[in-house]
Amino acid sequence: MITAIYAVLAMVGLGIFFGFFISFANKKWAVEIDPRIHEVEDALPKGQCGACGYPGCMAYAEAVVTNADVPPNLCAPGKDAVAQKVAEITGKKAEAMEPKIAFVRCAGTYEKAVRTSLYKGISDCVSANMLQGGDKGCTYGCLGYGTCVKVCMFDALKMSPEGIPVVNPDKCTGCGKCTTVCPRAIITLVSPDVMVKVNCNSKDKGAVVRKNCKAGCIGCGLCAKECPYGAIKIENFLAIVDSSICKEKCSDPVCLAKCPTKAIRPAIWGVVPGKEVAEAQV
C-alpha cells in the first residue's frame, strides 16, 4: 500500500516538474509571430484556391508579411478591395489588378460534336481523357464530365444540358483553379470586357475539324481578312484574337458575319458557348 502511494506521488511530482519545464521552455524559446500575418489572413476571402501561387491563404499571408518581394495584390478572388487592405496592413503599394474571367474555348455540344465511343467510367474529365483520349472525336474539345465545375470554390461554373460548362460572370473571381484541372487546357482567363471570343481550341486542319465538330474553327482566315485592324491571325489552323487591339479600335466586330462555322462569337457570358446570339444574327 505504501509503495503504491509513493509511486503515485512520484508520478505527480514528475508531472509537475515537466509541466513547469515545458512552460519555461515555451516562453524561453517561443517564436514570435508577426500579428500582421493573422490580420492579412482575416482580410483574404479564404477560398484556398492557390491563385496567388501559395498553398492556401495562410501561406500567402505569411509570405506577403515576411517577404518584401511578395506583392499585396496576388489574391485574384479578393480583387482590388482585398489588395488595398493587404497593402495597408503590410505597408506596401498595391498595383491595380486587371479583372479576369474564365473562358471555355469550346462550343462542341452534344448536338454539334461527334462522339467516337461510349464512356461509362468515372464521371471525371481527367479519367476519361486517360482512357484513349476520351470519347470525343475532337481531341481538343471539352469532354463534358465537369471536373472544372467540381473544383470551382465559388460556384461559378455549371454543366449545361448541352454538355459544356457555363461560367457565371457574377460569381467568377478569375482564380484560375478550373484552368489547372482541365486535361485539354480548354479553359483560359480573359478580360471580361473583350469584344469577341473564339469558341474553339482545335489545332487540327479544317477538314478534320469539320469531320468532328460543326462548331469548330477551320482556320479559313476569313475573319482575319475581314478585320480592318489586324486584330486576328491564324496560328496552327486556329483564329487568335488580340483582345487589346480589338477593345481599343473596334466598335463593330464585322469578323463575326464571315465565320462559316460561327466559331467566333460576341463575348457574351453566362450562356452555352455558341449560343451567345441567334444564328441568324451573326
Image (cartoon, grey):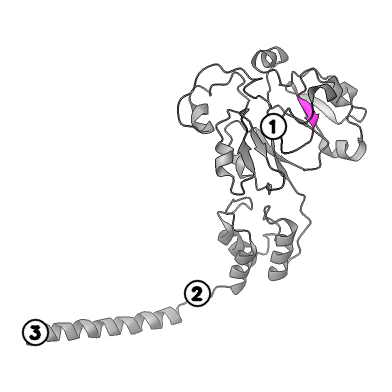
Report the disc number at residue 202: none
Question: Which of the marked residues, 1 or 3, is nearer the chain's N terminus?
Answer: 3
Q: CA distance from mark 2 to mark 1?
A: 53 Å
Report x, y in % for residue 46: 59, 58
| Snapshot quadrant of residue 73 | bottom right
Kindly tell me whether residue 282 is visible in this rendering: no
The answer to whether 140 is drawn above or below residue 86 in the figure is: above
Residue 228 horizontal side relative to residue 11, left or right:
right
- Residue 278 occupies quadrant: top right
- Disc 3 marks which residue? 3
Residue interval drawn in magenta: 262-267
- At 60% from the left and 68% from the top, the residue drawn is 37
Depth-wise, is mark 2 or mark 1 nearer the camera? 1
Q: As shown in the figure, which amino acid type bears the numbered disc 3?
A: Thr
Q: Position of residue 121 (x, y in %)?
A: 45, 27
Residue 224, placed above or below residue 2: above
Q: Which mark is residue 31?
A: 2
At mark 1, the secondary structure is loop
**Which of 188 and 230 lies nearest the eye of the viewer?**
188
Q: Is residue 178 magenta?
A: no
Kind of residue indicated by mark 1: Val
> How many numbered marks are there?
3
Which residue corresponds to mark 1? Answer: 272
